[in-house]
Image (cartoon, helix red, strand yellow):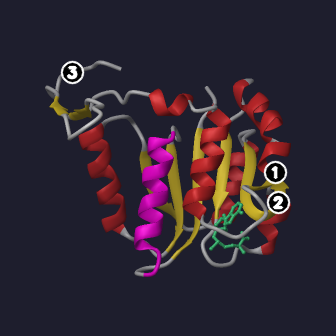
Amino acid sequence: MSRITVLRLGHRVPRDKRVTTHAALVARAYGADEIIIVGDRDDDLIRRIEGVVEKWGGSFSARFEDSWREVIRRFKEAGAAIIHLTMYGVNLPDVIDEVRRIWREGRSLLIIIGSERVPGEVYGLADYNIAIGNQPHSEIAALATFLDWLQEGEELRREFSNAKLRIIPSPRGKRVLALRSDDTSK
Ligand code: SAM
């Protein structure tokens, strides 16, 4: 089955704590399966993401690895398409149909997002360097937009299995359902 993995480069404590956490939350909420983070080890960050999964469900995972080169090599070897989000790349509307097609045909995706400066080598290793518009903005916005265009909005209707809490969408106020821990609904 085709999987979506996000590779977050250059995590620095304390500078990137919030941004990397938000990248992980966006990855999970927008349908990715996992995030791999390279940079300063930060167990606290992993615990926070695991806490969200525990409460809100699904099987998303987060972990640190030492070498982005090794992660990319492994994913390439396994046949995944390597996608690097960068403002210098080909603009999303010009390439998303092709990426969506290969993903729907069963190819897993490794989506790389940077922080400050992405090593030049990454541009050459990527199968696709993709810009979410050719203006500088944010890795969180870039990731959210890419995942949304890839899945054409379907990810927003997804329900997460084994959740302890589920929101009942309501036009006003907050409605949250506490589910039994043995609830296996999808
Ligand atoms: N000069 C960097 C670049 O190569 O895009 C901008 C650094 S930005 C602070 C951090 C990350 O946000 C980048 O590594 C990239 O993944 C993402 N990003 C920012 N603007 C983007 C855009 N327009 N399209 C795609 N990704 C973008």
Label 3 element class: loop
Find out whether residue 14 is within the magenta segment: no
Mark closer to the observer (2, 3)? 2
Q: CA distance from mark 2 to mark 3?
A: 44 Å
For label 1, the crowd category at 10 Å Cα-Cα, with few meaning under 14, some 14 to 19 and many 20 or more, is some
Q: Are marks 2 and 1 in contact (CB under 8 Å)?
A: yes
Query: Is residue 136 positioned above or below 183 on the image?
Result: below
- Residue at the disc numbered 2: 89
Q: What residue is at 81 percent from the left and 51 percent from the top? A: 128
Q: Quadrant of residue 78?
A: top right
- Residue at the disc numbered 3: 183
Q: Quadrant of residue 55?
A: top left
In this orientation, which residue lies closer to the viewer: 85 or 133? 133
Residue farthest along the top direction in this orientation: 185
Mark closer to the observer (2, 1)? 2
Mark before the other along the chain sequence, 2 or 1: 2
Mark before the other along the chain sequence, 2 or 3: 2
Name the amino acid, label 3: Asp
Q: CA distance from mark 1 to mark 3?
A: 40 Å
Q: Is residue 166 visible?
A: yes
In this orientation, which residue lies closer to the viewer: 174 or 115? 174
Q: Position of residue 111 (x, y in %)?
A: 66, 51
